[in-house]
Amino acid sequence: MHEIGMCEGLVELIERRAAGRRVASARVRVGARHAVVDDAFGQAFTLAAAGGTAQDAVVELIITPMTVGCRACGCRTESVDPLAACPLCGDEGVDLTGGDELVLESVTFGEEAADVSRHPG
């Protein structure tokens, strides 16, 4: 489950920005090439954030598509399927571009400071 490593890095970044404040929510944009599973991402974030300032944060995950270019018929389209084939002719000979980003778009902080034992390093 590669989501764990991804979420550990995100939580570290979020907690540095939080500087001891409670994190209410975060919005993360992930490219489709990462093949992130929404439920797995949520569980991984919960594990990575346990005991820290982001432990109760609500995370919004936005999956961004990649561009699929068919070498056989020239069709260009977007897809969130990392194993995409051409939707027009069905050929699997496609070029995939984009969809490889991982961006922490926003963090919202709560009203009070977090009371946790773990602090960003």
Image (cartoon, rainbow, N blue to C red):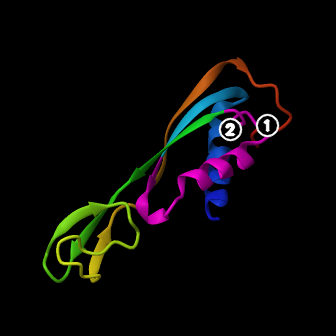
Does 111 sit above or below residue 25?
A: above
- Residue beneath the point at 86% across and 34% down: 117
Extreme residue toward the top, this view: 111
Q: Mark 1 points at which residue?
A: 119
Residue type at mark 2 is: Glu
Residue 114, percent across and down? 76, 25
- Residue 22, quarter of picture: top right
Crowd class of label 1 (few under 14; some 14 to 19; many from 20; radius 10 Å): some
- C-alpha span from label 2 to label 1: 7 Å
42 is within the stretch colored magenta: yes
Which sits in the foreground, 105 or 40? Answer: 40
> Split into 4 quadrants, where in the image is the C terminus?
top right
SS for dot 1: loop
Under tag 2, what secondary structure?
Answer: helix
**Outermost residue, right direction?**
117
State the residue at coordinates (82%, 38%). 118
Q: What stretch is highlighted in magenta?
A: 29-56
Rendering coords of residue 2 (x, y %): 62, 64
Q: Quarter holding the N terminus?
A: bottom right
Residue 74's spot in the image, x, y percent? 13, 75
Decide whether residue 50 is among the magenta residues.
yes
Give me the residue at 77% from left, 42% from top.
50
Please name the residue shown 59% across and 51% down the image.
39
Mark 2 or mark 1, earlier in chain = 2
Mark 2 is surrounded, within 10 Å at the Cα level, by few (under 14), some (14 to 19) or many (20 or more) other residues, namely: many
Residue at the disc numbered 2: 15
Image position of 69 (left or right of 120):
left
Q: In which quarter of the image is residue 53?
A: top right
Callout 2–callout 1 Cβ contact below 8 Å: yes
| Kind of residue at disc 1 | His
